[in-house]
Amino acid sequence: MADLDRAQYLLERMLDLAEASAKDGCTDARRTVLQKGFTFLQAEVLEILDKTNEEDI
């Protein structure tokens, strides 16, 4: 269950980053930084999913 909670938190954070990137005042440089953070969080979520799938087998 802890993994599910962590994945939920990471997904919510990814949404925050996506919303920040979509704002009118967001510069290209800031979007680049936000994208790096998004990509990092995405990798974390995928790692949790892989771990969970391995445990289910």
Image: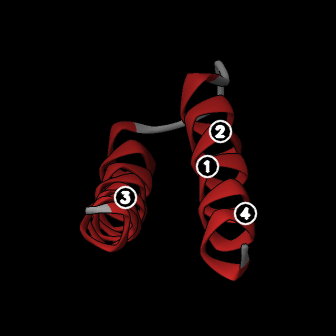
Identity, as a three-letter code, of the amino acid under mark 4: Tyr
Does the CB distance between marks 3 and 2 fall below 8 Å? no
Secondary element under disc 2, as helix, strand or loop, is helix
Judge depth for marks 3 and 2 and give the one in front: 3
Does the CB distance between marks 3 and 1 fall below 8 Å? no
Marks 3 and 4 sit apart, C-alpha to C-alpha, by 14 Å
Does the CB distance between marks 2 and 1 fall below 8 Å? yes
Identify residue for label 4.
9
**Most foreground residue, 31 or 10:** 10
Judge depth for marks 2 and 4 and give the one in front: 4
Judge depth for marks 2 and 1 and give the one in front: 1
Of all residues, the one furthest to the front in this rendering is 57
Which sits earlier in the primary sequence, circle 3 or circle 4? 4
Q: Residue at x 72, y 49 (%)?
A: 12
Secondary element under disc 1, as helix, strand or loop, is helix
Marks 2 and 1 sit apart, C-alpha to C-alpha, by 6 Å
Image vertical order of residue 7 relative to residue 23, above or below? below
